[in-house]
Image: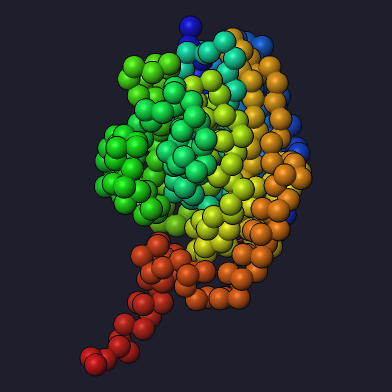
Amino acid sequence: MKTTFSIIKADVGGTPGHSTVDQRLMDVANEKLKEAKESGLIKDFFVTHCGDDLELIMTHDKGEDNEEIHALAWDVFTAATEVAKELGFYGAGQDLLKDAFSGNIRGMGPGIAEMEFTERKSEPVVAFLMDKTEPGAFNLPIYRIFADPFNTAGLVIDPNLHHGFVFEVWDIKEHKKVLMETPEEMYDLLALIGAKSRFVIKRVFPKEGGKLPANEPVAVVSTEKLFQIAGEYIGKDDPVAAVRAQSGLPALGEVLEPFAFPHLVSGWMRGSHNGPIMPVGIKDAKCTRFDGPPRVVAIGFQVKNGMLTGHADLFDDPAFDYTRRRAMEIADYMRRHGPFEPHRLPMEDMEYTTLPKVMDKLKERFEEV
Ligand code: F6R
Ligand code: MG
Ligand code: MG
């Protein structure tokens, strides 16, 4: 029997502004998912938030893209939206782009990261939840976890990791995907995923002939780009990811290690600025300064027979204090650029915001040079 680990998230209203999720919305989610667990639809669940995003973490045996599971998540989000509307929370229902559920939550606004796998004797899985950034923010850490020997000692030391991994990369503008192998194709892979607003790592697989089945993912990232769904800048595509760890895979500490470097990501303030991503515990997962800086939470689970038997809030740890301090130094440095690139996103990425309107207004006044 295989287990499916699903993270489905949406911003259904912030309190105050776009900063955080009110406990009452999480209470709605907890109640609904408790009922679903009692009815046998899901095996287990964990509700949390990162910034203004409500995060549903669920385990079940229904596989990826299951209609009942997606309908359940949609139901939770619409119920939470009702409460958010009553209480006047900010942007209530902002990520629910469609009026009614139509079989699959993909393309309807929420972000989804799901993977189905055969449980090992002991199965550690980390849920990474980001706010105020975009799916490409996961490219650097996922690459480093599975392909960088300076990050993951196991790539050098453990014979089970030595032959590398397969990366599924999506071109989110052309809606195409390609499978690439590391270490053989690492330069080509980096050529693509360094362009993180276009090419995003969707999944990572073990290679054939290893300890784990080659057709079962060991990592998955949500890749929903809301402006492409809605055709204009609307909602936010703050991403989530799930990564399996240990025994033939990168160790838990190797999975967390890339986040000790607060790399620059896009999506801060109005989805239009670059800034460092700061790893935080859930208690600090609220966006404040300049609506940020972008944050990432890591909840580690042990999964046994589809149950979440133990969990820990992994960045809620002094070991990441130094990274947080560095992130704030970088945030301060970036802020000094105000409306200038590279703090503000380049033209190409601003296409979906106000820039076309400014250009339109000035178009008559431009002269030949
Ligand atoms: C939302 C976000 C925020 C908003 C900003 C303006 O996740 O990134 O930075 O873009 O607060 O929001 P509005 O236009 O709703 O006032
Ligand atoms: Mg919001
Ligand atoms: Mg958000």
Q: How many marks?
A: 0
Residue 347 visible in this rendered orientation of the protein: yes
What residue is drawn where x is 28% and y is 46%? 188
Give how far across and how far down residue 139 sits, in percent: 44, 46
Question: Residue at left 29%, top 40%?
Answer: 185
* Residue 142, x across and y down, in percent: 47, 40
Residue at 33% x, 43% y is 186
Q: Position of residue 273 (x, y in %)?
A: 52, 64
Closest to the observer, 79 or 127 = 127
* Residue 80, picture quadrant: top right
Residue extending farthest to the top is 1
Viewer-proximal residue, 230 or 283?
A: 283
Q: Position of residue 106 (x, y in %)?
A: 42, 34
Which residue extends farthest left?
368
> In which quarter of the view is residue 125 placed?
top right
Q: Is residue 277 visible?
A: no
At 61% from the left and 34% from the top, the residue drawn is 253
Asked if 260 appears above or below 99 in the picture, the reply is below
- From the viewer's perspective, tell me whether residue 20 is left or right of residue 170: right
In the rendered image, the residue lying farthest to the front is 157
Vertical comparison of 42 with 262: above or below: above
Model colouring = rainbow
Image position of 293 with respect to 4: above or below: below
In front of the other: 245 or 58: 245
Q: Quadrant of the C terminus?
A: bottom left
